[in-house]
């Protein structure tokens, strides 16, 4: 342990070393680190702290969700038979992803569900991980587990890159509010949200850094997961055109995300005989035919108040009410982005809202908020400006997250 010399006021070691050797060793290590081109971008924001804290929150919140998956089926069991805790993960769209992983698109599922409505990215990984012997559903849980960690670190880095003036805590704070979102159960379940974010978040960070080829590759991979990748690709083009870091020789990379979408549509055409098989499946299974926004809003308000579902399924009623609240949040977020002149991110939110606003009704918009990284980073900024807002957010978000997760794990509609 170093002590200080009263003669030279420099740190000395146990043998009287003035510390020059220590400094030379430190300089050599810094020089070695600077040569690692792939890792040099970490050094400006002390990623060891950002990543460590982010993964700590990821681990804590994952444990919490898994505890709910065990306790909720037991707590809300109304059957005389002991409930299957494992089956709690197999809800709603998980069955469709499982069917694609097992049967593919060509063979079809025994239930006859319109599986063409789902992109292949997640089912392919579920099948690949399931080959280890754990099965496709457990494989999907593993995929979401890993992807949520990757996405959490990515949103922390993105927040750190955009708002570094708030210090080293802004990144982990953004990850925390994302991990504790009311609908965060879909970051753990075998759904597409975690995997999409694991590609979209680092893709947008690459774009903000002017690394357009990397951004295009990641967005193209995101396009294999869900149709939201098309909206993200459009936002990437706008970001390129409005960025000070644009390099015109990188512009052809922006065409890359179109390839997986066209390829998937061509594959479905070979099976169903039409280029519009995806849209046909959406309309058949989820009533997502084109509807004027004001009509869709009217349908949503009806379903949230005195509509058909109000008398039969109270969980549907409350979810449609959540859709309306989410719409207001999305509009407020859009206003903030326009005020900041964040044109690419504004296009991302507009496209997402537009996609849901032109369906029969607003459906699963609450779940789509997990894809809105500007929302969670913006909340982190507000929390750093007004710490008391952080206490209010956690005080409201965590109970809502428990309710949402409990609803999902007991088979109720949760968005």
Image (spheres, rainbow, N blue to C red):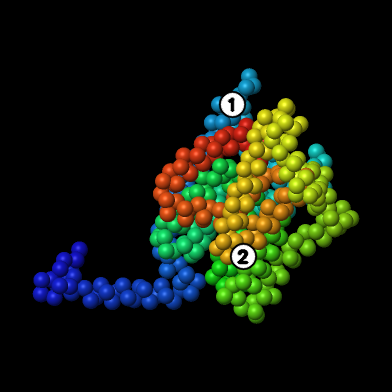
Position of residue 126 relative to residue 84, above or below, is: below
Asked whether the viewer can see residue 409, the reply is no
- Callout 2: helix, strand or loop? helix
Q: Is residue 66 above or below residue 40?
A: above
Q: CA distance from mark 1 to mark 2?
A: 46 Å
Q: Position of residue 338 (x, y in %)?
A: 60, 61
Residue 170, image x, y percentages: 44, 57
Measuring 60% from the left and 25% from the top, which residue is drawn there? 77
Crowding near the residue tagged with mark 2, few <14, some 14–19, many ≥20 C-alpha atoms within 10 Å: many
| Residue depicted at x 36% and y 73% | 30
Quarter of the picture containing the C terminus is top right
Nearest to the observer: residue 371 or residue 331: 331
- Which residue matches tag 1? 76
Of all residues, the one furthest to the right in this rendering is 273
Image quadrant containing the N terminus: bottom left
Task: Give the number of marks.
Answer: 2
Please give the label number shown on residue 343: 2
Seen from the viewer's position, the closer of residues 81 and 253 is 253
Left or right of 8 in this view: 213 = right
Circle 1/circle 2 CB separation < 8 Å:
no
């Amino acid at each position: 342990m170093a002590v200080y010399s009263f003669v030279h006021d420099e740190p000395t070691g146990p043998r009287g070393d003035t510390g020059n050797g220590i400094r030379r060793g430190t300089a050599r290590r810094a020089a070695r680190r600077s040569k690692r081109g792939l890792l040099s971008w970490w050094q400006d924001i002390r990623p060891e702290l950002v990543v460590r804290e982010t993964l700590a929150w990821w681990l804590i919140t994952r444990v919490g969700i898994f505890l709910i998956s065990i306790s909720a089926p037991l707590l809300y069991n109304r059957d005389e038979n002991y409930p299957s805790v494992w089956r709690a993960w197999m809800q709603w769209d998980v069955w469709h992803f499982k069917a694609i992983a097992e049967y593919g698109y060509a063979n079809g599922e025994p239930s006859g569900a319109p599986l063409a409505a789902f992109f292949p990215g997640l089912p392919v990984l579920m099948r690949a991980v399931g080959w280890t012997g754990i099965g496709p559903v457990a494989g999907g849980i593993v995929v979401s587990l890993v992807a949520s960690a990757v996405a959490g670190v990515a949103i922390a880095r993105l927040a750190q890159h955009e708002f570094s003036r708030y210090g080293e805590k802004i990144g982990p704070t953004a990850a925390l509010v994302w991990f504790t979102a009311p609908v965060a159960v879909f970051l753990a379940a075998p759904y597409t949200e975690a995997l999409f974010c694991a590609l979209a978040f680092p893709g947008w960070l690459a774009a903000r850094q002017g690394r357009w080829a990397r951004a295009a590759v990641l967005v193209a991979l995101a396009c294999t997961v869900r149709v939201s990748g098309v909206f993200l690709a459009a936002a990437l083009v706008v970001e390129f055109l409005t960025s000070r870091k644009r390099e015109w020789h990188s512009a052809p990379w922006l065409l890359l995300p179109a390839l997986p979408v066209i390829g998937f549509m061509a594959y479905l055409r070979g099976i169903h005989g039409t280029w519009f098989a995806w849209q046909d499946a959406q309309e058949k299974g989820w009533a997502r035919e084109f509807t004027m926004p004001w009509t869709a809003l009217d349908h949503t308000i009806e379903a949230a108040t005195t509509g058909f579902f109000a008398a039969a399924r109270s969980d549907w009623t409350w979810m449609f009410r959540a859709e309306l609240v989410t719409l207001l949040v999305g509009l407020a977020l859009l206003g903030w982005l326009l005020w900041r002149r964040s044109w690419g991110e504004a296009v991302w939110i507009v496209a997402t809202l537009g996609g849901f606003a032109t369906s029969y009704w607003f459906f699963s918009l609450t779940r789509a908020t997990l894809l809105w990284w500007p929302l969670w980073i913006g909340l982190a900024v507000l929390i750093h400006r007004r710490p008391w807002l952080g206490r209010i957010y956690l005080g409201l978000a965590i109970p809502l997250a428990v309710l949402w997760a409990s609803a999902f794990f007991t088979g109720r509609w949760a968005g």
